[in-house]
Amino acid sequence: MTSPRTAALLERLGISLPILQAPMAGVQDHRLAVAVGEAGGLGALPAAMLTLDALRGELQALRATTEHPFNLNFFCHVPPAPDAQREADWRQVLAPYHAEAGIDAAAIPAGAGRQPFSADAWATVAPFAPPVLSFHFGLPSPDLLARVKHSGAFVLASATTVDEALWLEAHGADAVIAQGLEAGGHRGHFLDVDPATALTRQMGTFALLPQVVAAVRVPVIAAGGIADAQGVATALALGAAAVQVGTAYLLCPEATTSAIHRAALASDAAQHTALTTLFTGRPARGIVNRLMRELGAMNPAAPAFPLATAAIAPLRQWAEARGSGDFSPLWAGQNTRGCRVIPAGELTRALAVRV
């Protein structure tokens, strides 16, 4: 039987199943969001790596394909000041790999690669009336958040600790995503970003979830390591109003996951994931590969998020052209057993079969 908290959230979101597809930048476009929405869940479209023109195009395609609600996701990081010395030191660490690949490191332009939510981004997406907006790394500025909420959009945001959940509730989030340590991709922590202490505060999903449920009044969505119907049922039994699932969708045909990434997910390598700062400068969980093994997954030389990406990008391109994921961010959570080569709609319904 559906709990009152789940029923209330489903009604507010306009969906029939308590399954939210995690926004996964770099491995999906609107097609995955549409497929999940058509099955009764809430599809998501990640915006952090898209130009405003590309984002507009994705929203046009989504709106032309489905009438179901969707979640539009943004990052809320503060862009770091460029640090020429740190960038030079980082490129020195990568020098042996650039030499191996025949890459002139001096010709690689520095760049962020990921942009935070902004007034320009809101002006771009507001005409599409997104029903749900979600944020990673906190919330946007109060004036910008007020514009979003004035539009009627439902606001989700990720918390990795009880303190973050309380902060999000106090600052305007309509629901909190409790992101356990098992989750693939970037950690959503934002109150403490000191590498020496931030990760020591992180908990597994089923330790974090009931504590967040007890602490806040808004609905709580469980995320991290949930990959099958049993995991969904357990999360709901622990007080979640819904669950957010990402990794399990990576092998679906509607995902844009690369052939190299798909092969890694289907191999024994997927049993070993780790948090790493190498690819972006911020802790994110992915399948361990050569770069992580040789440099150490949490190498302090990596520039601040998201500046680490620029010097890695040509190495990734070089290796992938040769069929190798040695320099690729193979994002994945700790539980890959739910990854199946089936349509996303079928997977969505299967996740909810015990609800």
Image (cartoon, rainbow, N blue to C red):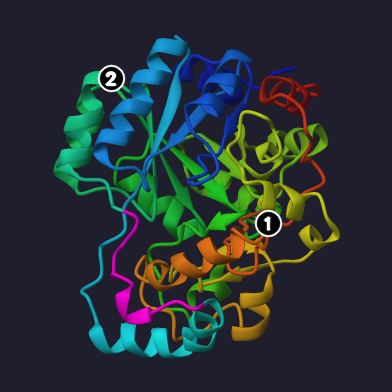
Residue at the far right in the pictured view? 268
Q: What element carries label 2?
A: helix
Magenta stretch contains residue 249: no
Kind of residue sitting beneath label 2: Phe
Q: Which of 321 and 71 is in front in this view?
A: 321
Residue 183, above or below 195: above
Quadrant for residue 330, please give it: bottom right
Sort mark 2 into few (<14), some (14-19) or many (20+) by Cα contacts within 10 Å: few
Mark 1 Cα shell of 10 Å, populated few (<14), some (14-19), many (≥20): few
The numbered disc on residue 114 is: none
Quadrant position of the C terminus in the picture: top right
Mark linked to residue 207? 1
Q: Which of marks 2 and 1 is nearer the N terminus?
A: 2
Figure check: 209 above or below 121: below
From the top left corner, tell me how far across and down residue 2 is, in percent.
Answer: 69, 19
Inspect the magenta stretch and tell me whether residue 107 lies in it: yes
Q: Name the residue under label 2.
A: 128
Kind of residue at disc 1: Ala
Q: Main secondary structure of the magenta part?
A: loop
Say which residue appears at 68% left-offset and 56% top-offset: 207
Residue range corresponding to the magenta coloring: 102-114
Q: Where is residue 345 in the image (x, y as percent from the top left)?
A: 68, 20
127 and 111: which one is in front?
111
Picture residue at 66% right of the left edge, 22% below the top: 3
